[in-house]
Image (cartoon, rainbow, N blue to C red):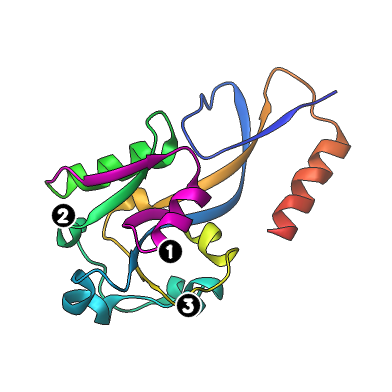
Amino acid sequence: MAKVTFNSGAFEPQHFNQEPLFQDYVLLAVPRSISVNQRYGEYGLSYQQIKTCDFLHFSGKRLSAACFAEIPMIFLTPNTYLYECSIQICQDAGFQPNIIFMVDQSTTAYNLARAEIGAVWVSNLIIANSPDCGSMIYYLVDNPKTTRTYYALTSKKRYTDKATLEFIRMCKDYI
């Protein structure tokens, strides 16, 4: 029986067949109550723009993460992709983030941000699949690490049966 796994991180391409499934985008979700929005709010996106993927066609300016260097942030715990990605985005912009809280789950971090505790780096998919609370502004940040591709991976050493290939095709169609 063939096995399939889904991955957006590093993997050894010499060992796996890879089929791109979808991309997701890491945005900075900032509570409206944080004063940085007065300076950069015109570049912000609404929940509806994220939900409908209109942000993919956004012609507005992507901001440097440095614009948000002083604001309080909620981070995932270390050893997660989003933690590593978020830290790297901040370091690329020349600052260490003001981390006020760390949690294990992206949805928990996002819900804490929605409670106006601090800003959070979060996937557009989590935003789109959460209810609109009206208290957030979303920013596209100018860094290539904010886009990631998810792949279906199967072993090059094992036969991949038709059912598995059909499952991967259905996943692509659904997503």
Number of other residues with Cα within 10 Å of mark 3, as a class: few under 14, some 14 to 19, many 20 or more: some
Residue 69, disc: 2
Secondary structure beneath dot 2 equals: loop
Residue on which the image places disc 3: 49
- Residue 17, visible in the rendered structure: yes
Which badge, 1 or 3, is on the more N-terminal residue? Answer: 3
* Cα distance in 3D space between marks 1 and 3: 17 Å
- The percent position of residue 46, horizontal first and vertical second, equals 42, 78
Circle nearer the N terminus (1, 2): 2
Q: Is residue 123 left or right of residue 117?
A: right
Residue closest to the eye, 17 or 125: 125
Residue 114 - label: 1
Disc 3 residue type? Gln
Q: Tally the marks.
A: 3
Q: Does the magenta portion include 76?
A: no
Residue bounds of the magenta highlight: 95-122
Q: Quadrant of the N terminus?
A: top right
- Give the amino acid at mark 2: Ala
Determine which of the numbered discs, if any, sits on residue 166 in the image: none
Q: Quadrant of residue 71?
A: bottom left
- Looking at the rendered image, the disc whose residue lies closer to the viewer, 1 or 3, is 1
Q: Residue at x 57, y 64 (%)?
A: 130
- Mark 1 is on which residue type? Arg
Q: Between residue 12 and residue 9, name the one nearer to us.
A: 9
Q: CA distance from mark 1 to mark 2?
A: 19 Å
